[in-house]
């Protein structure tokens, strides 16, 4: 069995942002030399998500509006968590909807994707450097 | 290490549908010959989910009502994504609640399940052929 | 390839509860002797979650309030599932928001965590003994 580990760094310009990180993950798979296995990609911070969906600008805005409806950023006093001095209570909730991680099959040396699958980093409390972990095991 | 890959095809009669695919995944585990490992099952399309929950008809209807409340299909003009000519904006949101994938332990050659765990394919934009990937690695 | 399997038992005092199970999972990783691999942790019951987020008391209360807003326990007659004689229809919905499982990288013999990641057992229909599965594969 072989294994590969790498950490990708991101810093978004906005509090909330959605970055297509598929090329970086594909490069990890290539560098790993693994042809059959599983690839884990997860946010290492608890106010961000890694998820798989469509690379379509309208959809990204739909997600953002929807998440704001389900867990609004304001009023920040609405969240007990913010009594600790944070203002990111909403981000911890939004991240549970979108998920922490994806596990993708590696087949024939490539991410085994359906036609529209793209890996996204969803940031809900950005404007600082944060990490995503890529771990691949297989042969 | 051994690995196994297969693709299951589904075409639902309704726009939204919930199919118990546990028998097909169990057959994959059997065919893989793997006794200890991990089994990934994921929707390859971004308007469908694979999730684990109860095989109970009332619950399936509860899920459907709840998802329609959280992300209604209509009015289709509500979703920016639908300006691309699609009418499935809601389906991309519903799928994030229910999830893309499950990872199940394989122990003693079988899916290592609790008493009521069943693997479901949740379709939110059906009436066409779509794929589910099964990838098993282990020994 | 090596594999490790264990089952953790929990019984919460309240219907809904949130337990930090990171120490127990860390002990599994230690006992497994695996230094590079993947660690799956999943609820084996379909009215409970395993998720990763912050160990902060205010946030746990925020999650609980939010989940009650999205899928209220009462009136129990609201859920078709409860016509089977259960009163846990809401718990099956809450668990989908918080997720069934996490997959965590094992690197250098340890859970490869970001600074605040903690593994939680989220119980939505407690006061009875329930299991969590830990499966680790790697080398």
Image (cartoon, coloured by chain):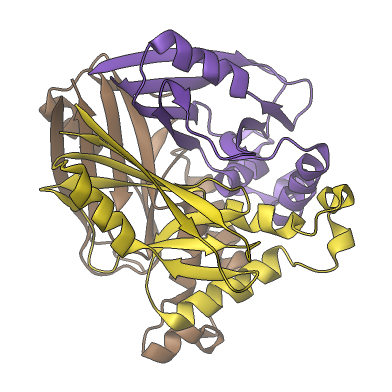
Chain colours: A brown, B purple, C yellow
Left or right? Give the position of B3 relative to B60: left
Looking at the rendering, which quadrant does residue B92 occupy? top right
Classify B52 as above or below B39: below
Compare residues C119 and B61 and report the one nearer the observer. Answer: C119
Quadrant of the drawing holding the N terminus of chain A = top left
Residue A89 visible in the shown view: yes
- The residue positioned 57% from the left and 58% from the top of the image is C129
The percent position of residue A19, horizontal first and vertical second, equals 34, 49
How many numbered dots are placed on residues in this image?
Answer: 0
The C terminus of chain A sits in image quarter:
top left
Q: Is residue C118 visible?
A: no
Looking at the image, which residue is at 25% across and 57% down? C26
Whole-percent x, y for residue A73 in the image: 51, 76
Quick check: A87 above or below C84?
A: below
Residue B59 point in image, percent of width and height:
77, 44
- C44 vs B34, left or right, is right
Residue B123, image x and y in percent? Answer: 66, 31
Above or below: residue A84 compared with residue B21: below
| Depth check, front residue: B29 or B114 | B114
- Residue plotted at (25% across, 51% down): A132
Closer-to-camera residue (A102/B20): B20
Determine the residue positioned at 29% across, 64% down.
C23
């Amino acid at each position: 069995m072989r294994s590969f580990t790498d950490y990708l760094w991101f810093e978004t310009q906005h509090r909330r942002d959605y970055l297509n990180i598929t090329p970086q993950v594909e490069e990890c798979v290539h560098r790993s030399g693994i042809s059959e296995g599983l690839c884990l990609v997860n946010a290492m911070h608890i106010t961000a998500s890694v998820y798989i969906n469509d690379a379509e600008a309208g959809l990204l805005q739909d997600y953002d509006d929807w998440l704001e409806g389900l867990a609004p950023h304001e009023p920040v006093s609405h969240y007990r968590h913010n009594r600790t001095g944070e203002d990111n209570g909403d981000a911890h909730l939004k991240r549970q909807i979108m998920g922490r991680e994806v596990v993708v099959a590696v087949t024939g040396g490539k991410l085994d994707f359906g036609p529209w699958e793209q890996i996204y980093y969803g940031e809900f409390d950005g404007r600082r450097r944060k990490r995503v972990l890529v771990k691949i095991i297989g042969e």
